[in-house]
Image (cartoon, helix red, strand yellow):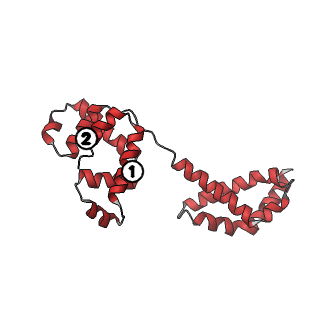
Amino acid sequence: MDKVQQNIIFNDLLDRHQNLIISRIRRYHHGDIINDHLQNVLIKFYHLIPRFFKTTPDVFDSPSWIVRVVDNYLKDIYRANNAKKKLKEIKVADFSAISCILNEDIHEVIKWDLASKESLHEAIDNILDYLKKEERLLLLMKYYYGKSSDQISSRLKIKHVNVRLNRIKKKIQKEINPKVYREISSRFFAN
């Protein structure tokens, strides 16, 4: 297939199905990102033309196939954006310092020298960066600000706060070694 034929087929596809493609993207995204995804989906369709048009030309007339291609692209983007983050190795001593700050034991924190404080901040940032935004917020509200589960539930308009907190703890537990998790659970997650 030469480029002229490919361009003709692509323009025809675009004329007939552009609104459908945009509506599928708008189901999951809002704002300026829609144009970026539209452009990437159209590039995907352009590259699919030589592969599919000779064997099954009817597929380009099928709205269900168009929807499937767009949805698969959006799923790939979602997976790429939510790829599993890995925790860096954190020392037990870092968790001791974290627990001092979260339990507001200032006297213990003062004993730390500058180098230890830097590793402390790195450890805290590492745990919080690993978690999703809502998970971070739940942990900070519960263990840093000392809010009750009812306060968190009404403030964030979510249910089952304790269940969610337990899931977050298990998520962290899967990523760090057992010795470190025992330390964090006895200090960091102390109720």
Residue at image x 24%, y 36%?
96
Amino acid type at mark 2: Ser
Residue at image x 49%, y 44%?
84
Amino acid type at mark 1: Arg
Vertical comparison of 32 with 110: above or below: below
Identify the residue under disc 2. 186
Residue 79 appears at what percent x and percent y? 56, 50
Residue 133 appears at what percent x and percent y? 39, 53
Relative placement, left or right, of 123 versus 87 is left
Q: Nearer the viewer, residue 133 or 150?
A: 150
Vertical comparison of 77 with 149: above or below: above
Q: For residue 118, say whether it is visible.
A: no
Mark 2 element type:
helix
Residue at image x 73%, y 55%?
45
Q: Nearer the viewer, residue 113 or 83?
A: 83
Residue at image x 15%, y 37%?
108
Q: Quadrant of residue 46?
A: bottom right
Q: How many numbered badges does the structure rendering display? A: 2
User: Badge 1, how many Cα within 10 Å: few under 14, some, many 20+?
Assistant: few
Q: Quadrant of residue 92?
A: top left
Q: Nearer the viewer, residue 97 or 122?
A: 97
Q: Nearer the viewer, residue 8 or 16?
A: 16
Q: For residue 110, say whether it is visible.
A: yes
